[in-house]
Image (spheres, rainbow, N blue to C red):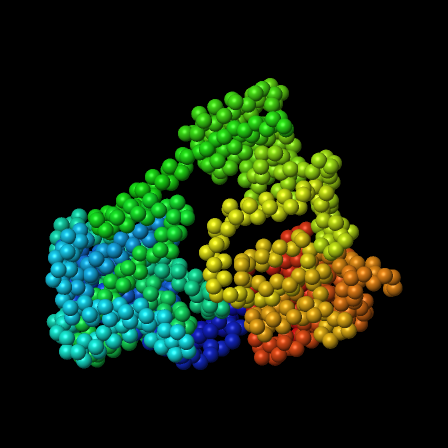
């Protein structure tokens, strides 16, 4: 270590080193550059932010310049300091009701001071690193709050649309609506109707012309079009009035009751923080949908985002601006417009400053009725049918409805507090709602006690009544279908189990996972006192219906055994699956997915029709409701997989599980031995070549992975193959693997291997060699060669050891290649390239 420390005495006359010893000299400072994508995205966001900022300021009753101040500060301060680079901050519709109420109660200067105090509170919360705590708020409460605010905005702006003046509350606006309808202003209604028409129809213009026109934001087109028509028609309407910046009101000392000011600060802090943090999470999801963007900008730092929002609110409030928060509409436009860094958000703030200083004469042509119609449409959109369907599916519609009504009738803070109280009550109700049933299977002589829900002390009396229905000496299966059991329930169940087994009965305790039992100290977890020893499908009752999870293997779903199956088949299958051969190291017969190789436990399955129907039924009940929305999106958009995954037909290889992928991510081709026939061979197989061509040329996949696995029956068959004999379909197919066998037998070529250990046997060696060989075959395909030449495609080699559940990736660019472990660290792109 001392050799790395400079030993020469410091000399003040010499120039000091500015870089560490043994490190390269510092490079020249990089010139600041703004990507073209950020410039175009900032313009798109600016065109949306300008009319919305004025409209939100109008809806709150604040000076119209306050909206422009908040938009500029949100872009420059929150954009520079925030932890979500692509989120755009500014005056948000979700803060309209809160700000309007504050202005009505305390005046504008005190409202600005409250904004500053809320920003300081956000800075404190960010320093305490509690940002993720805000995500614990139920989504039903957040969606209900936004829906209530949307209703309040829409009802208030409706009066301006009709040519009148809004009242101070929703109920007052509703009471005044009949009189407003009786005395509506035709000019204001006409301009508002034109604004709403353009806002609705602009995104729906069909054809190539529509795609070009849709690049202009609908909000800008609607306000501009309505303003132009009003000016050309000479309509007399109230218009935007931006006073001189010299008379702009800044923040003053807060005046009012202390408790009221504190409540206002807490309300503003809560709404700003929750909306901004949830918006940052939503931006991360949108960025993940763009290939390569997540790696470029990274995931949001929520604590830093809270600090950035707090700093923006301090500056905005001090300069006389509206409260600032992350805005979903502008953030979505930023991501979809192609932004790649925080420069887009900051540049949009610069454009707002330029507009506020130089475009005042143009902005004063905008009718207030047009801005009111725009904000009313935003308020209506905040009542999302998608959110309503989501909370209904999760049985939280009561929380959503109470929060919405509370915000509309009482106010934001009161409505959110009421929603939290209802959410807590619903959670307690679910915690205490436990269904306990007792069933007796007379044919098998087994009693089933099924506990659905959490098992707490409140359910102990019902559990005790159900357990005492079981006669002495009977065999009983107690199924605990829940994730929590408190001490009182544990002792009650343990005491009954000990008593029942002492009287000659047997008890089998199961849960959502196989082998869940209650044990005494010193007993093995597998059995417990008097419990039936677990079998291979111990958690599958024989006649009481299937109680297995829908994603478990079919072998564990056989709740009804065929009468002809001998009792020993299951244990034999279990022994076979746990043997060294089954682990995939030896490739012994009977462990392969190749045709003709029996699957472990094959004799233990019931009728295949029952298996299929039972599996489909479980999917429709449990899994389909969770994935229906995602599959509906894929059905609309079509398949856009990121890679072609070519692997073996072995039943033990679950590609989605190994790669942690979901529907639409992988284009999978499976065949015996994960073989890629060379193009142009006599009697060549066109199925694999067609899939490769379709994936590369049509689907535009960015990578192809060839995945081999341990214990491959196809490789075992290649090793044991003898020349001559009857040419069966399997033998004709396996001839495409002969180059792999020849490559391994060629002593002049290095063998493929595993990092850290030698291949276990010849089968594993051939499996590794086969992956490398098939990558060479891939390069011979014309579509692959073209894509590789253009740099649009990568080839990866992968090996999966079934018994170890360990994946290996081909990492060394050598002729043979070495497969290295894949651990929990992030693997860089350069680590995944196949040999050149």
User: At which x and y percent is residue 637?
Assistant: 48, 65
Left or right of 599? Residue 269 is left
**Depth order, front residue of 670/543:** 543
Q: Would residue 107 be visible to someone looking at this image?
A: no
Quadrant of res 578: top right
Please identify the quadrant where the C terminus is shown. Answer: bottom right
756 over 408 or under it: above or below: below
Which residue lies most toward the front here?
182
User: At which x and y percent is residue 243?
Assistant: 13, 73
362 over 775 or under it: above or below: below
Left or right of 146? Residue 132 is right
Which residue shows up at 33% across the image and 72% down it?
202
**Depth order, front residue of 731/1:** 731
User: At which x and y percent is residue 408?
Assistant: 23, 51
Which residue shows up at 57% across the image and 20% down it?
471
Which residue shows up at 59% across the image and 28% down it?
441
**Depth order, front residue of 585/658:** 658
66 over 631 or under it: above or below: below
Quadrant of res 511: top right
Q: Would residue 206 be visible to someone looking at this image?
A: yes
Count the marks: how many? 0
User: At which x and y percent is residue 560?
Assistant: 64, 37
**Depth order, front residue of 13/39:** 39
Which residue shows up at 56% across the image and 70% down it?
699
Quadrant of res 238: bottom left
Left or right of 194? Residue 733 is right
């Amino acid at each position: 270590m001392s050799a790395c420390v400079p030993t020469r005495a410091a000399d003040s006359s010499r120039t000091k080193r500015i870089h560490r010893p043994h490190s390269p000299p510092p490079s020249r400072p990089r010139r600041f550059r703004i990507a073209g994508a950020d410039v175009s995205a900032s313009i798109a966001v600016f065109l949306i932010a300008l009319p919305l900022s004025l409209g939100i300021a109008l809806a709150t009753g604040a000076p119209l310049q306050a909206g422009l101040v908040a938009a500029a500060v949100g872009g420059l301060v929150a954009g520079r300091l925030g932890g979500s680079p692509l989120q755009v901050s500014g005056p948000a519709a979700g803060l309209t009701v809160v700000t309007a109420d504050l202005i009505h109660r305390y005046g504008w200067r005190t409202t600005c001071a409250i904004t500053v105090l809320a920003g300081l509170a956000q800075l404190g919360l960010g320093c305490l690193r509690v940002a993720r705590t805000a995500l614990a708020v139920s989504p039903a409460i957040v969606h209900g709050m936004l829906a209530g605010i949307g209703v309040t905005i829409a009802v208030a702006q409706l009066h301006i649309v009709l040519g009148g003046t809004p009242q101070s509350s929703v109920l007052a606006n509703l009471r005044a609506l009949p009189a407003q309808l009786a005395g509506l202003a035709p000019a204001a209604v006409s301009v508002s109707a034109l604004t709403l028409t353009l806002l609705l129809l602009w995104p729906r213009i069909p054809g190539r012309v529509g795609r070009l026109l849709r690049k202009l934001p609908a909000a800008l087109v609607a306000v501009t079009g309505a303003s132009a028509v009003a000016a050309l028609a000479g309509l007399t309407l109230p218009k935007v009035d931006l006073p001189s910046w010299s008379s702009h009101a800044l923040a003053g000392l807060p005046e009012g009751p202390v408790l009221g000011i504190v409540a206002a600060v807490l309300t503003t802090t809560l709404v700003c923080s929750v909306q901004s943090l949830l918006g940052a999470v939503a931006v991360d999801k949108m960025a993940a949908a763009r290939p390569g963007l997540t790696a470029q900008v990274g995931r949001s730092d929520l604590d830093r985002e809270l600090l950035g929002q707090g700093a923006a609110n301090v500056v905005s409030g001090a300069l006389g601006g509206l409260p600032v928060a992350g805005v979903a509409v502008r953030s979505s436009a930023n991501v979809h417009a192609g932004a790649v860094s925080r420069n887009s958000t900051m540049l949009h703030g610069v454009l707002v400053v330029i507009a506020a200083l130089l475009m005042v004469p143009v902005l004063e042509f905008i009718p207030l009725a047009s801005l009111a119609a725009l904000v009313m449409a935003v308020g209506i959109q905040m009542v999302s049918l998608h959110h309503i369907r989501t909370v209904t599916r999760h049985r939280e519609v009561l929380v959503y409805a109470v929060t919405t009504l509370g915000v509309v009738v009482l106010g934001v803070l009161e409505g959110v507090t009421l929603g939290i109280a209802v959410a807590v009550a619903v959670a307690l109700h679910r915690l205490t709602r436990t269904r306990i049933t007792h069933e007796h299977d007379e044919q098998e002589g087994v009693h089933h006690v099924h506990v659905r829900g959490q098992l707490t002390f409140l359910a102990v009396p019902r559990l005790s009544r159900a357990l005492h229905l079981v006669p002495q000496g009977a065999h009983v299966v107690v199924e605990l279908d829940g994730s929590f059991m408190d001490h009182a329930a544990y002792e009650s169940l343990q005491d009954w189990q000990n008593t029942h087994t002492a009287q000659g009965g047997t008890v089998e305790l199961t849960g959502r996972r196989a082998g869940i039992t209650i044990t005494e100290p010193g007993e093995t977890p597998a059995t417990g006192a008097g419990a039936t020893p677990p079998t291979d499908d111990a958690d599958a009752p024989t006649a009481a219906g299937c109680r297995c999870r829908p994603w478990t293997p079919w072998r564990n779903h056989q709740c009804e055994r065929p009468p002809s199956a001998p009792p020993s088949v299951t244990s034999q299958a279990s022994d076979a699956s746990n043997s060294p051969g089954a682990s995939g190291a030896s490739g012994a017969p009977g462990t392969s997915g190749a045709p003709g190789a029996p699957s472990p436990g094959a004799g233990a399955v019931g009728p295949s029709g029952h298996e299929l129907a039972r599996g489909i039924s479980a999917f429709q009940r449990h899994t389909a409701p969770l994935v229906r929305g995602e599959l509906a999106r894929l059905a609309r958009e079509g398949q856009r997989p990121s890679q072609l995954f070519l692997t073996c037909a072995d039943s033990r290889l679950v590609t989605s599980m190994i790669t942690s992928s979901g529907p639409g991510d992988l284009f999978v081709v499976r065949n015996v031995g994960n073989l890629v026939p060379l193009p142009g061979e006599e009697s060549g197989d066109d199925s694999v070549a067609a899939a490769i061509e379709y994936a590369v040329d049509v689907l535009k996949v960015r990578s192809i992975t060839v995945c081999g696995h341990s214990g491959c029956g196809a490789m075992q068959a290649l090793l044991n193959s003898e020349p001559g004999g009857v040419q069966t379909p399997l033998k004709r197919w396996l001839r495409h693997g002969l180059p792999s066998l020849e490559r391994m037998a060629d002593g002049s070529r290095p063998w493929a291997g595993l990092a850290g250990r030698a291949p276990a046997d010849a089968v594993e060696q051939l499996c590794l060699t086969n992956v490398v060989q098939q990558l060479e075959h891939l390069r011979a395909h014309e579509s692959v060669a073209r894509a590789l030449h253009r740099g649009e495609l990568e080839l990866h080699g992968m090996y999966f050891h079934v018994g170890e559940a360990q994946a290996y990736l081909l990492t060394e660019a050598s002729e043979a290649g070495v497969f290295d472990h894949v651990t929990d660290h992030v693997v860089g792109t350069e680590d995944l390239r196949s040999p050149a």
